Amino acid sequence: MADKPVYEEASIDGQPPKLASIPASDTTVWADASPLLQAACAGLRDGELIHGDNFNLFAAMSALEIMDPKMDSGIVCTYYSIDEAIENGAAPIPISLDSTIDVRCTIDIMDHLLACEAAWHKGHSLAQTVFSCIYLLRLDRTAPHALLHSYCRIIRATCKAVVSVVSDARTHEEEDLFTMTYGLPLNGDGDDKCLSILNAVEETISRQLRACKATSSKRRLPEDLEPLQSNSNLEEGFCKALLCRLRFRKHFFHVLSCMKRPQGRGLESARKHIASCLTELESILESADFLRSCFDESCEGDIDDKTTASGFEPIGFDAMLNSRLSAPTPPRAIKILSWKKAVEYFVKLLHDLDVICSYSLDPHLESLLRFVVQFQKSQPDLVARSHLQLLLVQDGKLYGRDPFFAVINKAAALPEATKNHDIQKNESFLQLGMLVMNLLKILCTNAAWQRRKLGKFLQDWRVIYVQLELAFRNEYGEVSSSSNDENTCMKIFQHILLWVEEQTYWIAFRFLILGFELELYSTGEYCMVYWYLYAVLIKLTEKTHLMMAVSHDTAKRKGKKKKDSSKDLARESRIPPAVLFLQCYICLAEGLTMMLAALRNEIPVFHSPSPFNTEHEKFVQHFELLQRACIPDHVSYPSYKESTTHARFSTLAMYNYFKDAQRIAKEVKSSFSNDPERLAELRKLEQVAEHNSVAQNVICRLGALDPSLKVSFEFSHHPFFATVVVKRS
Amino acid sequence: MEQEVGESLIQLGNSDGSNSSSSDPVTRVRKLLFRRMLVGIKDGRFFLGTFHCLDKQGNIILQDTIEYRSTRRSSPSPMEQRCLGLVLIPSSCQNSCHVDCSVEEQLSLLKAKMI
């Protein structure tokens, strides 16, 4: 039977026009399958599916459901596309034919962009924040509007700079929406000239400001200059409002550029720009009153929630236009920060950056670690932390300047001469350098990420210790050689081995106390946590003390011919202040362990076991990473039980660890008179010790007798040593 | 003409009694699995992907889906596309459903129709 060439009839012409624009292929056509599918559906049983062998119901649940607003980011809203929005006047240029309104609207856009930028820094996507601005999405069309154009350019360049810093630091996995640009137009031609464009606009407005002041004082206008806008009463206010905003952007861009310079060369200049930024932010805040009052119409709603200083809604923003760009997964609904909160955010960011810029680039690792820990106490945001990390670790060197072996050499109290020793080419020493580098990077991340990474890190430090020890034994065995170089090598090994141990215990200590900051321990677990902390602190103190003794030796060997050798001897026999400091910690940890153990053993309500897991299981959960790395050795659940099982109020009364802690804290204060950070810490420790000492006395006297006694734990005086509060209910 | 091709897909088995048990709609739709399918939905978008699953209510799951949409409300206008991956299209929002058919297949389908 001759067939008509049916494919012609099923050709594209016969198909609906829309379908025609999605051609199947050269040899195929689209055939309507709806009737067949309908028939199949009728033939299926309830719950039956038609699927292939690779089908997995669990995996299928991850499918995006079309037309569900929480899952479908392509649902058509007001406009089909950015171009359609522009064609319908969503982002007019100029914004208004009335120059006064045009200027006010421009300021509103600037303010809203600042709020968007802050929201972006805080962890939302670029597409929903800064790039919800239609003007930014099609920057070239703003060219006729100098003010808007220059501002958009510098915003774009600034965002690009921030993305670059955060990407380089690679700490952004923690806030996963941050650097995804998904094809947003971040790279612009000629953005390197954005500063000069901005300067030109700033210059014009400065002249306009001078001109309007000249007019008001009845002086003659020096030049024939068009005013900023048409209402002469508002000219000064608007000029000032604009100038501080433009200047803030200029100085902020300079801050980022200066801080980017290698080896911290731009830090001092950055500080100057930071100071200027803060001044301009002050002016920006002050301009709010003027902007709110310059029009008769008042805005509705709470002014504090608004994203602009004037309180009016900005023109030209639509977050939905970009929803298809923000991610394959649809965007969460987000709230842009209020303008006030945005300014506050930038003030804090600038202060955090200033702390970084003021840092002296101390080559001593120990001071650096303390600086980073102290910096983190102010809870800096991602942008600030990325900058810190990039300052510390550049080109595989500390501050881009000091090779890590030299840093370790110094930290391990080895003589200056050994820092160039060939031994650093040894594989283990290279790895050790990497570990120190990674430690610095980890310490710059947020608390949760940091703790997770530090926990895993312990294993690496343990392994490197074992490797170094093995290498040491293989090379030198037990015999002391007469060769000078071999002696040096031996010394390097010995010092570094000791230093690695000290560092490992420091990491373990940090891992444990971050648990308090993150509120990972329940009250019933404090006893075992303080006990473990005590065990780690004992080891840390031991290694620190040894390290100091060894460094003292090195100093002596530098050939100081002291006449007063008796004084030296006396100094040697005293315990170094840093060690005393740690002993204060030990006393507090021990005191709390014993008190908590006694409470648990004597008062039934304290010993309520959880229905979910046993104490042993909790011990393993919390300390698994430490146990696996054998930090410290010979510490286990049975040894914990053994230490705490016999604690009673009567035994508690026999020794007051808190009084010891108080005494040590008082004694050691004088040694740290130049160190405000450690003085503050000692004061806190004293307070905890004092309160807990009193609490212990009360508990010991009344604990067993008074069933109405309520004991609770607060971190009111110190972030990780609890203050015991005793009340009668 | 499209309608006829569609009907021919249904009637494939009916004219040939010998293998009617393997030619019921469900079996034939099973044969369409992993084929490229183009689903149009009510807001004007199209989704092109490989046919992965169908349920009794008519909800369709497509794999390696590309979404097509026009850039203007009024046609004609250029189309934008983006990749979505695994997608579920509820039957309530479906407007049309087409399957990629080779010309030979159409020919053989229509041979079987024998009308």
Image (cartoon, grey):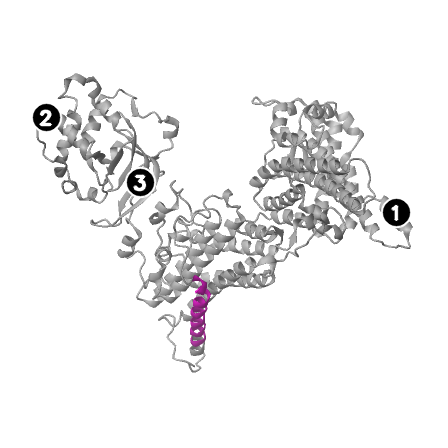
| Disc 2 packing (10 Å; few <14; some 14–19; many ≥20) | few
Labels 2 & 1 near each other (Cβ < 8 A): no
Q: Is residue A523 above or below residue A270?
A: above
| Disc 3 packing (10 Å; few <14; some 14–19; many ≥20) | many
Task: State which region is magenta.
Answer: A191-211
Quarter of the image with the N terminus of chain A in it = top left
- Residue B64: give x, y in percent of width and height: 33, 36
| Most distant residue in the bottom direction | A220
Q: Amino acid at mark 3?
A: Ile
Q: Is residue A196 magenta?
A: yes
Q: Is residue A707 above or below residue A512?
A: above
Residue underneath mark 2: B114
As measured in the structure, the alpha-carbon distance from the residue carrying label 1 to the one carrying label 3 is 80 Å
Q: Tell me which chain the residue with mark 1 is part of.
A: A
Left or right side of B49 for A350:
right
- Residue A213: give x, y in percent of width and height: 45, 75
Q: Which mark is residue B66?
A: 3
Q: Tell me which chain the residue with mark 2 is part of.
A: B
Labels 1 & 3 near each other (Cβ < 8 A): no
As measured in the structure, the alpha-carbon distance from the residue carrying label 2 to the one carrying label 1 is 113 Å
Kindly tell me whether residue A683 is visible in this rendering: yes
Please name whichever residue, A715 or A175, is drawn nearer the observer in this view of the structure.
A175
Q: Are marks 2 and 1 on the same chain?
A: no
Q: Amino acid at mark 2?
A: Met
Q: Which mark is residue A570?
A: 1
Q: Amino acid at mark 1?
A: Ala
Between disc 2 and disc 1, the foreground one is 2
Q: Are marks 1 and 3 on the same chain?
A: no
